[in-house]
């Protein structure tokens, strides 16, 4: 199986048992001491104080959280509308179905300057994509995942997803208290998440802002020949129990967005994962970075495969639900 690497920006070092307040205090101290010079230089360049720079960064972070919540609300409305109208999912390359509530996807050109980066190669774009997400959340990257997917791999996943739009994926929930574990079994409990694919409009092929007249452009010729990008897509992940109780009104804990703007020009699809922030202002999220990583990797296991194991599990889940064996699914999802 060929997998694409996911970028996870939360360090996974084992931490001592200290209070969250004590840990947060030292984290702020370490962050400020490490980036003091950079903060000072950036403040000088912008002609503002360091405190003003921090305040602006905090406001940007809060605005980003509000945007994610709004995107979640749109996703919930879209899910409800799809259930009520029983609308079908458009096939990759087919004309997209107009959405009354608008697409929940934040346009890629609002994140990256496509007209400028279209002239650089795929590896440089991948590095820029990683660096951008690593700089989020005051330079910690918390709340985000990202990856660069080869177009061929994305098209394989999309083809499977149009046939099997939904599925359930497990996340391990080991008991932190060893004394409460059952000595008669070594099984690790799991929480199941309900995942849903959705396909949206196909983005236009970007063009360079100021093309070099002495360098032949392959991008313009591709667009001139009628080449179109595949549809953008999203995957929503919601705890299964919450989905059962609230159905179309359930809040997704993680949203993966596949941007296909550069599919025809560079042969890549940019993946952006956004973890839903908690309701408070304490910087917490509904899902940990590690759990988001596990869900994202399991998408690859069941929708991008070289053997028939996942296909059999997916088809049984959809076509013969009474015969679906969750233990078989669990066994496959835990394979390396």
Image (tube, helix red, strand yellow):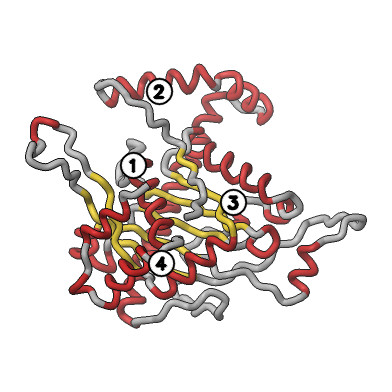
Q: What number is the disc on residue 197? A: 4
User: Which marked residue is nearer to the observer: mark 2 or mark 4?
Assistant: 4
Q: CA distance from mark 2 to mark 1?
A: 18 Å
Q: Nearer the viewer, residue 27 or 176?
A: 176
Q: What number is the disc on residue 60? A: none
Q: CA distance from mark 2 to mark 3?
A: 28 Å
N-terminal label among 3 and 1: 3
Q: What number is the disc on residue 111? A: 3
Q: CA distance from mark 3 to mark 1?
A: 24 Å
Residue tagged 2: 27
Which of the 4 quarters of the picture holds residue 197? bottom left
Q: Is residue 30 above or below residue 314?
A: above
Q: Position of residue 208 (x, y in %)?
A: 77, 57
Give the residue displayed 42% in from the left and 31% down from the top: 11
N-terminal label among 2 and 4: 2
Q: Position of residue 222 (x, y in %)?
A: 75, 69
Query: Mark 1 and 4 residues: CB-CB less than 8 Å, in contact?
Result: no
- What secondary structure is marked by label 1? loop
Q: Position of residue 198 (x, y in %)?
A: 43, 69
- What secondary structure is marked by label 4? strand
Q: CA distance from mark 1 to mark 4?
A: 21 Å
Q: Position of residue 254 (x, y in %)?
A: 37, 53
Is residue 177 left or right of 49 when viewed as pictured?
left
N-terminal label among 2 and 3: 2
**Quick one: which residue is furthest to the right in this view?**
214
Other-residue count near label 1 (Cα within 10 Å), few / some / many at <14 / 14–19 / ≥20: some
- What secondary structure is marked by label 3? loop
Query: Mark 2 and 1 residues: CB-CB less than 8 Å, in contact?
Result: no
Which of the 4 quarters of the picture holds residue 329? bottom left
Other-residue count near label 4 (Cα within 10 Å), few / some / many at <14 / 14–19 / ≥20: some
User: Which marked residue is nearer to the observer: mark 2 or mark 1?
Assistant: 1
N-terminal label among 3 and 4: 3
């Amino acid at each position: 199986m060929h997998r694409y690497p996911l970028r996870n920006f939360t360090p996974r070092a084992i931490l001592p048992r200290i209070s969250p307040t004590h840990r947060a205090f030292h984290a702020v101290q370490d962050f400020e001491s490490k980036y003091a010079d950079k903060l000072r230089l950036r403040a000088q360049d912008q002609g503002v104080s360091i405190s003003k720079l921090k305040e602006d960064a905090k406001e940007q972070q809060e605005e980003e959280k509000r945007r994610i919540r709004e995107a979640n609300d749109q996703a919930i409305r879209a899910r409800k509308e799809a259930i009520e109208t029983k609308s079908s999912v458009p096939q990759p390359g087919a004309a997209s179905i107009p959405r009354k509530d608008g697409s929940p996807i934040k346009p890629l050109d609002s994140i990256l300057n496509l007209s400028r980066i279209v002239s650089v190669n795929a590896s440089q774009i991948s590095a820029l994509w990683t660096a951008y997400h690593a700089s989020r959340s005051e330079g910690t990257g918390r709340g985000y995942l990202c990856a660069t997917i080869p177009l061929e791999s994305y098209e394989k996943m999309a083809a499977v997803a149009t046939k099997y739009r939904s599925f359930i994926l497990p996340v391990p929930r080991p008991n932190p208290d060893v004394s409460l574990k059952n000595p008669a079994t070594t099984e690790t409990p799991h929480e199941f998440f309900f995942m849903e694919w959705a396909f949206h409009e196909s983005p236009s092929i970007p063009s360079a802002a100021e093309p070099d007249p002495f360098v032949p452009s392959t991008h313009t010729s591709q667009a001139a020949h009628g080449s179109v990008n595949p549809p953008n897509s999203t995957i929503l992940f919601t705890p299964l129990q919450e989905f059962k109780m609230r159905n179309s009104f359930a809040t997704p804990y993680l949203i993966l967005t596949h941007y296909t703007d550069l599919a025809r020009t560079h042969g890549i699809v940019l993946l952006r994962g956004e973890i839903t922030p908690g309701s408070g202002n304490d910087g917490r999220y509904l899902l940990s970075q590690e759990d988001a990583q596990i869900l994202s990797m399991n998408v690859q296991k069941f929708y991008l495969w070289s053997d028939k194991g996942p296909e059999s599990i997916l088809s049984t889940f959809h076509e013969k639900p009474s015969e679906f064996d969750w233990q078989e699914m669990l066994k496959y999802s835990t394979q390396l």
